[in-house]
């Protein structure tokens, strides 16, 4: 059977399109966070967008390895709110969970049934990653909704992502005393990349 007409080919094309769209949605969300002086959320969206791009590249590579040059597909892709970061985060949680729980497991099963073990494993692996995206977005969305993005009940260490200044307290300073960066650059040190627990 010509690979072009398999369910796996259609799944790869849908997954590629979906990952490209997710990358763009998160890139637009990052731009909104930047405009709202929330570099922390900007970086969260950029970090995730970069991973979505990598997923798209993996799906493209799989299609190319089978010689797929074109495939007509139909699909439905979300249009998220564009001016409310809490709503964008909430929508992102739903999208990521839908991919992790429904879309990619179905794609993995179809690929497995057609004998495409690599593609089946790829869909399963990326489903797990999408779940981690949902968890990350849910955590930051909850903090944003509850007003705790820059507030803790107990003393904690805050890191200025702009210069690296560390501040111990229930809130980071409104402005970094070292570099003058706005509070939006602050992150709980335990959530900052490349720092020791």
Image (cartoon, rainbow, N blue to C red):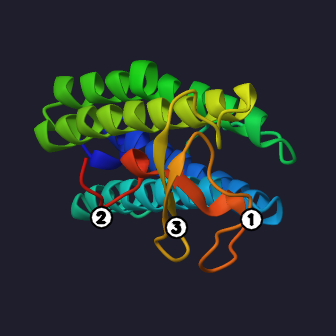
Residue 131 at x, y = what percent? 40, 30
Residue 63 picture quarter: bottom left
Q: Which residue in the protein does label 2 denote? A: 64
User: In this orientation, which residue lies closer to the viewer: 73 or 62?
Assistant: 62
In the rendered picture of this protein, how many numbered marks are placed on residues?
3
In the image, is 39 to the left or to the right of 137? right
Residue 116 at x, y = what percent? 16, 38
Query: Residue at position x 62%, y 63% from top?
Result: 185
Q: Is residue 71 visible?
A: no
Q: Which residue in the protein does label 3 denote? A: 161
Residue 51 picture quarter: bottom left
Query: Residue at position x 49%, y 69% from top?
Result: 165
Furthest-bottom residue in this view? 179
Query: Residue at position x 34%, y 32% from top?
Result: 127
Measure the alpha-carbon separation of dots 2 and 3.
39 Å
What numbered label is drawn on residue 34? Answer: 1
Does residue 21 sit above or below 132 in this rendering?
A: below
First in sequence: mark 2 or mark 3? 2
């Amino acid at each position: 059977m010509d690979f072009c007409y398999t369910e796996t080919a259609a799944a790869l094309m849908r997954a590629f399109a979906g990952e490209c769209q997710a990358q763009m949605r998160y890139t637009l969300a990052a731009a909104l966070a930047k405009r709202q002086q929330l570099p922390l959320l900007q970086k969260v969206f950029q970090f995730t967008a970069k991973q979505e791009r990598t997923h798209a590249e993996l799906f493209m590579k799989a299609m190319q390895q089978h010689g797929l040059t074109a495939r007509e597909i139909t699909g439905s892709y979300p249009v998220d709110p564009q001016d409310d970061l809490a709503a964008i985060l909430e929508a992102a949680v739903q999208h990521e969970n839908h991919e992790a729980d429904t879309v990619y497991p179905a794609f993995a099963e179809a690929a497995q049934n057609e004998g495409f073990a690599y593609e089946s494993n790829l869909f399963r692996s990326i489903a797990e990653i999408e779940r981690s995206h949902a968890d990350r977005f849910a955590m930051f969305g909850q903090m944003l909704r509850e007003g705790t993005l820059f507030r803790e009940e107990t003393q904690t260490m805050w890191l200025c992502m702009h210069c690296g200044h560390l501040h111990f307290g229930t809130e980071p300073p409104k402005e970094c005393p070292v570099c003058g960066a706005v509070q939006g650059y602050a992150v709980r040190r335990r959530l900052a990349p490349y720092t020791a627990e």
